[in-house]
Amino acid sequence: MEPSARRMGGSAWEGFYRVFMRRTPIYVTFVVIGAFIGERAVDYGVRSLWDRANAGKKYEDIPVLGQRQSEE
C-alpha cells in the first residue's frame, strides 16, 4: 500500500523530476533554455543597475556628443 500512496501523492520535487529530468533530451533542453533565460535576466539586471548608477554620465546623455550629425 505504501508504494501506491507514494505514487498518488508526492512532493513538487518528484513532479518536477518526472516532467523535466527523467529523459536526457528534455533535461538538456530545460538546462539550455534555463541558461538562456538566466543570462537574459542577469544582463537586464546589470544593465539597469549600470544605467541607474551612471545616469547623466553616459555618452548618449551628453547633448553635444550624443547627437549624430545629419548628412545633408
Image (cartoon, rainbow, N blue to C red):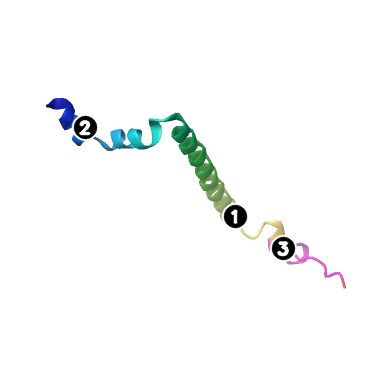
The residue that mark 3 highlights is 62
The residue that mark 1 highlights is 51
User: How many labels, in total?
Assistant: 3
Q: Residues within 10 Å of mark 3 (few under 14, many from 20)?
A: few
Q: Amino acid at mark 1?
A: Asp
Residue at the limit of the structure toward the bottom, as seen here: 72
Question: Which label belongs to residue 7?
Answer: 2
| Mark nearer the N terminus (3 vs 1) | 1
Q: Nearer the viewer, residue 42 or 17?
A: 17
Residue 20 location, quadrant: top left
Establish if 24 lies above or below 40: above
Where does residue 4 sit, x and y in percent of width and height?
Answer: 17, 30
What span is colored magenta in the figure? 61-71
Residue at horizontal 68 percent and vertical 56 percent from the top = 58
Kindly report the distance in space between the C-alpha atoms of the residues bearing marks 3 and 1: 14 Å
Q: Amino acid at mark 2?
A: Arg
* Disc number lying in front (2 or 3): 2
Q: Is 6 placed left or right of 64 in the picture?
A: left
Q: Secondary structure at mark 3?
A: loop
Q: Secondary structure at mark 2?
A: helix
Quadrant containing the N terminus is top left
Kindly report the distance in space between the C-alpha atoms of the residues bearing marks 2 and 1: 50 Å
